[in-house]
């Protein structure tokens, strides 16, 4: 509705969810809700990481300079130009993705409920939520840190595991997946924000060439390591591309099984053990997203159950284990499945899980 009617007509639109999201930010002024909604949208768009995605989003909603009162057709045409696409092609593909990405960040900002975030679009590090899951593995205590934020905001984790398909093809940077987010965050940009190097993509292409699979698929469970690109500035040292998705011929869909998720996770842990001492200091921490729970079609419950199969069998008792999800509701599902007793990290919260140890 905002895309169709534009910012100048916000007050006349029926936007209960956007109004509620804006009102969840402390200090929001009810009588000025159109301004609060616009601030929320601007904050969400500012978190898209620059480049074509952010520019297209700004044009789509009329947030770009001089576009506030432009007609919807003009805004769509100008947004399509960012990707060099026809208006119709943009409408059927990228536009939905752009709006979806804005919605993701609206939900995130509303969940954090931080006024400074809504005003500036910057999420201060202390408000990146996490939970500490205290579990049991073979009768011994096991701690897993569950991060609740986009994967590209991870810091000081040695290895991030990224889901991939059997062709080890990375999606375009503007896509919404975990692998696209990591590729985007790993890109090297100039002072204007334009991408000048794509090291994660280039490293993965080099790995495929070295292993003779540039033009043929690999088996599910394969794990290909690459450097982190610009994510090195956040303390990330390796990205492991874990093959869990098998493309369905003649479609845009994938097939993912819990068995392939468990196999890929186990192989990622084994690879990390093999690479551990080749780095200084040795690799010690690893973070998994919910492999296969996006376009792969697995439920979060099935994905984390498959991951637990590998984590529970991991012989390395000194490894730091992390999981990352975007939404608090998904974090609740993960907590329920693992059956651990949790302590919430900053911002602090009550020890609210009532469950049993998971062995």
Image (cartoon, grey):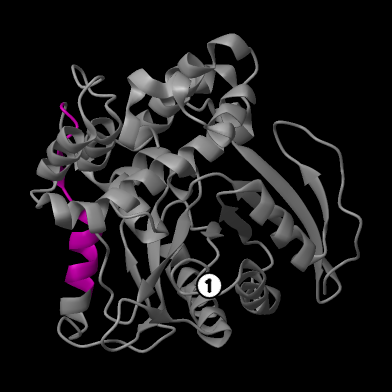
Q: Residue at x 40, y 66 (%)?
A: 240
**Does residue 153 appear in the picture of this structure?**
no
Helix, strand or loop at mark 1: helix
Q: Residue 266 sits in which quadrant?
A: bottom right
What percent of the width, then of the height, locates residue 153? 46, 41
In this rendering, position of residue 326 left or right of residue 153: right
Residue 109's place in the image compared with 229, above or below, is above
- What crowding class fits label 1: few (fewer than 14 Cα within 10 Å), some (14-19), or many (20 or more)? many
Residue 138's place in the image compared with 226, above or below, is below
What segment is highlighted magenta in the picture?
A: 192-207
Q: Residue at x 20, y 88 (%)?
A: 216
Q: Which residue is mark 1?
A: 269
What percent of the width, then of the height, locates residue 80? 15, 45
Q: Residue 255 sits in which quadrant?
A: bottom left
Residue 105's place in the image compared with 164, above or below, is above
What percent of the width, then of the height, locates residue 96? 33, 52
**Does residue 70 appear in the picture of this structure?**
yes
The question of residue 197 being in magenta is answered with yes
What percent of the width, then of the height, locates residue 121? 43, 24
In this rendering, position of residue 69 left or right of residue 116: left
């Amino acid at each position: 509705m905002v895309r169709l009617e534009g910012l100048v007509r916000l007050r006349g639109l029926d936007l209960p969810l956007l109004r509620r999201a804006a009102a969840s930010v402390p200090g929001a002024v009810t009588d000025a809700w159109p301004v609060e909604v616009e601030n929320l949208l601007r904050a969400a768009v500012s978190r898209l990481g620059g480049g074509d995605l952010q520019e297209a989003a700004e044009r789509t909603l009329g947030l770009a300079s001089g576009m506030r009162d432009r007609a919807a057709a003009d805004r769509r045409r100008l947004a399509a130009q960012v990707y060099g696409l026809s208006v119709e092609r943009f409408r059927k593909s990228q536009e939905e993705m752009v709006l979806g990405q804005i919605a993701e960040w609206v939900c995130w900002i509303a969940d954090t409920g931080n006024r400074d975030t809504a005003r500036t679009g910057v999420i201060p590090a202390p408000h990146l939520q996490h939970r500490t899951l205290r579990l049991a593995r073979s009768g011994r205590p096991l701690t897993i840190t569950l991060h609740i934020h986009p994967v590209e905001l991870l810091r000081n984790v040695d290895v991030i595991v990224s889901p991939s398909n059997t062709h080890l093809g990375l999606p375009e940077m503007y896509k919404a997946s975990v692998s696209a987010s990591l590729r985007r965050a790993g890109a090297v940009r100039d002072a204007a924000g334009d991408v000048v190097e794509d090291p994660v993509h280039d490293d993965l292409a080099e790995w495929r060439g070295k292993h003779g699979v540039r033009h043929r698929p690999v088996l599910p469970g394969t794990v290909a390591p690459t450097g982190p690109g610009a994510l090195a500035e956040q303390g990330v040292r390796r990205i492991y591309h874990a093959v869990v998705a098998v493309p369905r011929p003649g479609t845009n869909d994938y097939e993912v099984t819990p068995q392939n998720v468990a196999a890929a996770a186990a192989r990622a842990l084994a690879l990390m053990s093999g690479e551990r001492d080749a780095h200084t200091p040795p690799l010690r921490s690893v973070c998994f997203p919910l492999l296969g729970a996006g376009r792969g079609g697995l439920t979060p419950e099935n994905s984390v159950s498959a991951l637990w199969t590998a984590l529970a069998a991991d012989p390395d008792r000194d490894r730091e284990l992390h999981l990352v999800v975007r939404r608090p509701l998904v974090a609740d599902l993960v907590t329920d499945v693992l059956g651990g007793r949790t302590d919430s990290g900053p911002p602090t919260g009550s020890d609210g899980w009532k469950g049993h140890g998971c062995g």
